[in-house]
Image (spheres, grey):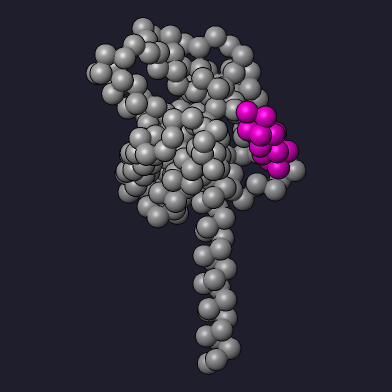
Amino acid sequence: MKGATLLLMGAAILVYCGVLERVLDRMRLRDRTALLLIGAMLLGTFLPPLRLGTVAVNIGGGVIPLGVCAYLLIRADTALERWRTLLGTGITAAAIYALTLLLPSEPEQLPVDPTLLSALLGGVAAWLLGRSRRGAFVCGVAGMLLADTVTALVNWRRGIAQTLTLGGGGLADAAVLSGMLSVLLCEGIGEAVERVKRRRMQQRGGVT
């Protein structure tokens, strides 16, 4: 997960330099808050997971990211945005679970990192359902964790004994990366669409 660690370090640097200020504003987060959350997830990565029977939740990769998701849902502008985000989370989880059934079980056999595919699903789902950066993060994180939960439930029903580990990779877990990449993807798509619209408006204005 060296690439994941570098990605998160890069995100922290961009936050510190103010490059992601616009994205954070849309997510109702301040730069200092974002840095504190990244630091808390890093610290939580090295703490023992919270265990409840056959379920283990990593603090840095599960508890804190889910807390951020809850905060973003509470701070949503409208109830419609909340419902869209929850719908997007369900769609993302279903798509990720479907991928696990269709793609090879060994990540080395895949041409693309599964995390990137999950982030792509989360970002596209959130953008299509409201173009919300807050929704993109929730779809990416909660969608990945929900898909992991569904996989464990199916295995338990089949009699396969396993421990459901949520956010086991800590700060560099697939759920955290999926959330961050979903936001960046949603931002990129949104910016591209807005530029195309502005160009069309300018061209129409020039014609008239």
Q: Is residue 152 above or below residue 119?
A: above
Is residue 155 found left or right of 16 in the rendered image? left
- Residue 49 belongs to the span the image colors magenta: no
Q: Residue 4, can we see it?
A: yes
Q: Position of residue 183 (x, y in %)?
A: 53, 45
Image quadrant containing the N terminus: top right
At x 51%, y 20%, the residue is 168
Residue in front for this viewpoint, 200 or 110: 110
Q: Residue 86, can we see it?
A: no
Quarter of the image where one finds residue 166: top left
At x 42%, y 38%, the residue is 103
Q: Is residue 49 above or below residue 15?
A: above
At x 34%, y 26%, the residue is 151
Is residue 89 found left or right of 172 in the rendered image? left
At x 57%, y 68%, the residue is 195
Q: Report the residue that reaches farthest toward the bottom.
A: 208
Q: Position of residue 158 (x, y in %)?
A: 25, 18
Residue in front for this viewpoint, 112 or 123: 112
Q: Position of residue 180 (x, y in %)?
A: 56, 39
Is residue 106 found left or right of 15 in the rendered image? left
Q: Is residue 83 above or below residue 58?
A: below
**Residues rendered magenta in the picture:** 1-15
